[in-house]
Amino acid sequence: MNLFKIELKRGFIGRGFIVAVLISIILAVGQFAFMSLKTMINYGNFPMKDVMSYFTIYNRWLLGTGSNFWPFIYLMMIPLLTTVPYGLSYYEDLQSGYINNILIRKSKRAYYFTKLGVNFILSGIIAIISPVINFLLTMTVFPLVKPMAETFTFEVSVKSNEFIYSLFYNHPILYLLFYMVIIFIVMGLLSNLAIALTGIVKNRFVLVLMPFLIYQLVTIAIQIFKPGIYSLSVIINPVVGLVNIRDFMLYATVLSVAGILPFIKKIRQGGEY
Amino acid sequence: MKKLGIFLMCVLVCIWGYFTYQVNRKYPAPNKVVSKEEIKNVALIDGLTFKLKAIKIFETNDELVENGVIFKENINSLEYKGVLIYGTLRNDGKKNIKEYIDKITSCVFTSNRTYNGVLMDEFIELNKSLVNKDSISSNESVDIVIPMVHARNNMTVQEWNNFKNVKLSLYFSLYPTIQKLKLN
């Protein structure tokens, strides 16, 4: 537990984490300034002030609109952003020899799983910082009015998953929490691949790009081969509401196994780190 | 330094709370259905430059739910000059609309969503001979507004309740068009 705390602190005060947080804040504030505030200025003098169903927080926040620059950038950048804080820590430990100091006192098993756990948490936090901050900011200019399906201003439609559709129009806050959890888990596990691939990929820049490349490759492969599952970028996108348990479990399992497998191998083999 | 950070955080939370409270007080959740007359009045106040001669509110009725598109009116009784359809179309709704179009001399279409724009484009293609505009112009008169909703085979209570508020959403859906007209 002590090692976990040390590593977590190391991650939180690291330069990578601060940079990722700053970029996330820029994304959140950028969308708020150029979209939410702009809408509010244009439509602020709404004739019927006692009702405001057309524009609500649920179709004005960062992940409430589909065809827009900001959500596109967020969904594109997020695998890269989540790898920045801690994804290279194992690589740096190996390069600097810091790992030797730790392994004198701790087992390999504890060290590897701490790395994965800390990276999972930090990546998840980075992934949800933008949406959360943006949602809080949007709350200051748009009311928390329950979405109304027939206004056709919400991207969640009958094309979406039935559960998501029902959740969005009946319990929108739960819908948001649900997606934050999905984004946290998927991005945390995806980012763990950077740690897992450290022994295989030798270049730090390629390593930091690996989750991003895998994310994009999966999206492209699914578009080409159409295997009947949704891509990661669709699953974490609340706008389309197409997440389903089967696909989510499939990705979660594959990413978890891919993240853990190289370390299990190393633990069993012994010798090399 | 730590105390200053906590103090700044408290200030930020207070500012956020103030604005959030204000905006939610200003725009509380809608709890009433706006009457047809009220919509007309609002439209007039807003300086609507096209005439809403007869806003026909279509409500759902089990007998008249056809292929996922809800129509209240018997299409044969329609004798309106122009139609402003808002909302989006499902593939299986095209047939119904086609029947509508055959009864009407000129039509105006609008869709406030790009998400289902493809469906709307397909539909316009289908009725190219009759449709000469894809957006409303300031000197066009619109006699009827047909709201449509996507419907599942069985509407939930929530959907039904929402649909009953369609009068309200009707105005909201027209709002960008009105603003556009005002700008022109």
Image (cartoon, coloured by chain):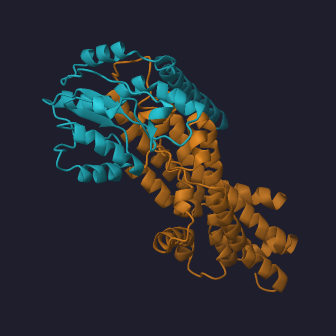
Chain colours: A orange, B cyan
Q: With respect to residue A16, does A34 lie above or below?
A: above
Q: Position of residue A213 (x, y in %)?
A: 51, 72
Image side of residue A94 versus residue A148, left or right: right
Q: Position of residue A173 (x, y in %)?
A: 61, 36
- Which residue ends up furthest to the left in the rendered image? B139
Q: With respect to residue B76, does A196 lie above or below?
A: below
Q: Position of residue B24 (x, y in %)?
A: 51, 22
One can see residue A13 in this view = no
Q: Position of residue A80 (x, y in %)?
A: 53, 63
State which quadrant residue A256 falls in.
bottom right
One can see residue A100 in this view = yes
Residue A155 or residue B77, whichever sits in front: B77
Name the residue rendered at 41%, 44% in the picture: A30
Image side of residue A19 versus residue A47, left or right: right
Q: With respect to residue A9, does A89 lie above or below?
A: below
Name the residue rendered at 46%, 49% in the picture: A27
Q: How many marks?
A: 0
State which quadrant residue A17 falls in.
bottom right
- Which residue ends up furthest to the front in the rendered image? B76
Quadrant, the N terminus of chain A: bottom right
Name the residue rendered at 64%, 42% in the picture: A177
Q: With respect to residue A87, does A66 lie above or below?
A: above
Residue A149 or residue B10, whichever sits in front: A149
Name the residue rendered at 55%, 51% in the picture: A21
Quadrant, the C terminus of chain A: bottom right
Residue A9 or residue A189, whichever sits in front: A189
